[in-house]
Image (cartoon, coloured by chain):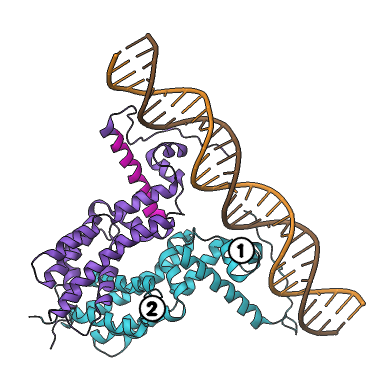
Chain colours: A cyan, B purple, C brown, D orange
Amino acid sequence: MKTRRKPELQVVGTSPRASAPTQRRRQSEILDAAAKVFAERGYYGASTQDIADVLGIRQASLYYYFSSKEIALELVCMKGVEGFFEAASEVASRKISAADKVRGLVEAHLAPLSDRADFVKTFLNERQYLPSASRKKVGKLSRAYEKVIEKVIAEGVASGEFRKTLDPRLMTLALLGMCKSVSVWMGKEEHYQVPEVAEQYTRILLAGIGKKRR
Amino acid sequence: MKTRRKPELQVVGTSPRASAPTQRRRQSEILDAAAKVFAERGYYGASTQDIADVLGIRQASLYYYFSSKEIALELVCMKGVEGFFEAASEVASRKISAADKVRGLVEAHLAPLSDRADFVKTFLNERQYLPSASRKKVGKLSRAYEKVIEKVIAEGVASGEFRKTLDPRLMTLALLGMCKSVSVWMGKEEHYQVPEVAEQYTRILLAGIGKKRR
DNA sequence: GCCGGATTCTATAGATCAATAGATAGATCG
DNA sequence: CGATCTATCTATTGATCTATAGAATCCGGC
């Protein structure tokens, strides 16, 4: 509970210290390790020692890169959630049918699982442990994202493209639930690739599994 | 800043020296408290002190009822998973259409959320922290349960009742994902009741959200 | 009215963990 | 060479948590 000291005066002179690119690369390696460990064992299940072990450095050395475990979680979660809202908004703004928008939303949701699965997983499962301020921040982003999806579905219902007997909110929750669970089993059920899952999940959502209707 | 004084007691049930029925009732109160705390804060996020606080007793007193925190988790998880396999098997054995079986499976999956949500939630989210022996045990139960669902769907596909273009395993994962996520938001999204959710989720699964096909 | 088991308590040991302080090796550059 | 900066190390503190030991309390039945 001490105020942290900072090297306040940084010279704006000619030589930018050392190698800024190397520095940033190392920072992101540290974050990758944190994300991996948080995703695997959960925030409280993971110790800073575990993170250090992944990197092959000492536990205390981590604190050169972040000032607390909570901050590390916040950084990981932010990287896990960022992009979702923007990607969904972009899809929603296209001039296409509601069904095609749903397809795009599912694809956009699953795409990050290919290259930042640990960050997304940590965001999904561990954000509850964020300190209140940042929890509210990611909560806001997350809710905005859900609203984009809900709006697409509501508009599909309003236009008659989707069935009116279904509650848009529940459909949104169903879509999110399906997609969220992918992050759990993806990587264990080896043979599935993201595009294939997106395709089939979209079909289930739009047409169900039943063969015929009416 | 050491000693915790505990003045006022909002005690759940004080009746020492009790006959077997009372004893078992107290045991189940203890487990309820553990389930509640595990579900809310996660296994490692929850301390035995938190559980004791819910009950209005001292942390050490818990150890009269279970010998370790891990054992408590195991008991909670077992109670959270038990019944799923049996209920699903019963549904699968009925002489009804595959579509009606799916309806029954969804209903059977969501039903426990009404009366033992904390146990189910803990099973779903915290079972990864079980010691290896019991983790394997619940894992086995859980996989058997999934197989029942997968078989129902596969038979529906084989009989032509469901669409052949969809992978039964992926459909099973979609169903489970949808249902699992219900345990997360149920209780926050106040206005939804279990039967209503089961009904709408079943409809989405069987017929999708799109209005017409072919 | 008191005995004995059931239940809860106090107190604390022992382990783990996040975080701090300060030292040191290595690189870069004048 | 020597100054400086970066990145890591060693060592340790203080907090927190699980679990144990043993004392105190409660209560039904004799």
- Residue linked to disc 1: A67
Asked whether residue B1 is in view, the answer is no
In the image, what residue type sits under mark 1? Answer: Ser
* Quarter of the picture holding the C terminus of chain A: bottom left
- Position of B206 with respect to D18 (left or right) is left
* Residue B188 higher or lower than A166, as above or below: above
- Reading the image, the residue beneath label 2 is A190
Q: Is residue A169 found left or right of A35 in the rendered image?
A: left
Q: How would you classify the magenta stretch by its main secondary structure?
A: helix
Q: In the picture shown, does residue B10 fall above or below A140? A: above
Indicate whether residue A82 is drawn in magenta.
Answer: no
Q: Please provide percent x and percent y for residue B145.
A: 26, 64
B39 above or below A36? above
> Could you say whether the residue bearing mark 1 is in a helix, strand or loop?
loop
Q: Which residues are magenta?
A: B23-43
Instruction: Indicate the secondary structure of the residue bearing disc 2.
Output: loop
Q: Earlier in the sequence, mark 2 or mark 1?
A: 1
Q: Which amino acid is tagged 2?
A: Glu
- Tell me, for residue B55, which label it has, or none: none
Q: Chain of mark 2?
A: A
Q: Position of residue A24 (x, y in %)?
A: 62, 78
Say which residue appears at 39% left-offset and 52% top-offset. Answer: B38
**Residue shown at 44% from the left, 64% from the top:** A127
Please name whichever residue, A151 or B138, is drawn nearer the observer in this view of the structure.
B138
Q: Position of residue A122 (x, y in %)?
A: 45, 68
* Residue B40 falls within the magenta-colored stretch: yes
